[in-house]
Amino acid sequence: MAPKNSKVSRNPNLIPGIGKYSRSQMYHKKGLWAIKAKNGGQFPHHEKKAKPETTSEKPPNFYPADDVKKPLVNKRKPKPTKLRTSITPGTVLIILTGRFKGKRVVFLKQLPSGLLLITGPFKINGVPLRRVNQSYVIATSTKVDISGVDVNKLDDKYFGKKAEKKKKKGEGEFFEAEKEDKNVLPQEKKDDQKLVDASLIQSIEAVPDLKAYLAARFSLKSGMKPHELVF
Amino acid sequence: MVKGRQGERVRLYVRGTVLGYKRSKSNQYPNTSLIQIEGLNTKDDVAWYCGKRMAYIYKAKVKKNGTHYRCIWGKVIRPHGNSGVVRAKFKSNLPPKSMGAKVRVFMYPSNI
């Protein structure tokens, strides 16, 4: 017999709490008479599985004075922010805020946190592989061919702050530790940047003027009205 | 206010002027300010700017956070009237000396 996919009640509700059929009618509908007949007059009865013996627990030493309510379990997983339809991989974006404001930059992909992964490319305008929030970016209609770029290994963890090592206590060592804490960009990140940019720069140079376009910054000039501009 | 190394100035905000507080003839309500944004002439134009953040920047004698410049953040709430004037609410109400002063209306949170 093929298993039924959806469990629909055989007893439709007339009003919530009141079914259409009585107990005896439901007995007939469910076919309990046939199950009993198959089993020789009795309803089939299975022995309960023996529970494995657990070691007896000590009664607790401490009982809290008041009953504290446990909060309900929350299994909700947030989705990444909905990406605007104007932003597709390869779109040129204008960054609106931060140290790279006004820079035109290539969009690579949306990370699971919802932030956008972008790159200058670094050689063209000095913007490295970076995360940016969708709200602080204007999408232009210019697209760059991004098919040659492999961004699978770039993730939110890649960009997260490194966990700081615990500083040793001890006066001599304390001073030394402070000096060593310089922010040197690891060579691995520089290599990742070059890898991603290599194929990107090729597709950019294929389009006339695109390289100069990406190198230049966007700025509002006198008489420019953003609400009338078409990006 | 971070100065870039080359000093390339990009303006990524629209200039606006503080006209005063929301008011009737003889009462004013300082929690909302009226802003005239450059280039806006009609109520329909304002729709693009609703929700955009703005900053009122002023100077003070005492250095705070390493700078003489201070800022009050706010945002565009809704149009005011039919001719492109805009209502804005700031984190703390704008001081009366801001009337006639410039305000920067940024292009974020962006929706384009």
Image: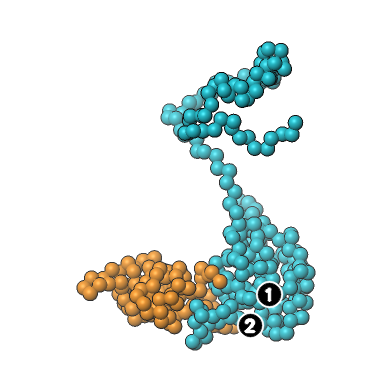
The front one of B34 and A164 is B34
Q: Residue at x 69, y 35 (%)?
A: A4
Mark 1–mark 2 distance (CA, rounded to whole Å) = 16 Å
Q: Which residue is mark 2?
A: A216
Please name the amino acid that badge 2 sits on.
Ala
Q: Which residue is mark 1?
A: A143
The subunit carrying tag 1 is A
Rendered shade, chain A: cyan
Rendered shade, chain B: orange
Q: Residue at x 51, y 68 (%)?
A: B109
**Horizontal placement of A10 versus B103: left or right?**
right
The front one of B86 and A63 is B86
**Horizontal placement of A33 versus B91: left or right?**
right
Q: Quadrant of residue A109?
A: bottom right
The subunit carrying tag 2 is A
**Label 1's element?**
strand
Relative image position of residue A31 (x, y in whole percent): 65, 23
Residue A108 lies, with reference to residue A71, above or below; the image says below
Relative image position of residue A70 (x, y in whole percent): 50, 35
Could you confirm whether marks 1 and 2 are on the same chain? yes
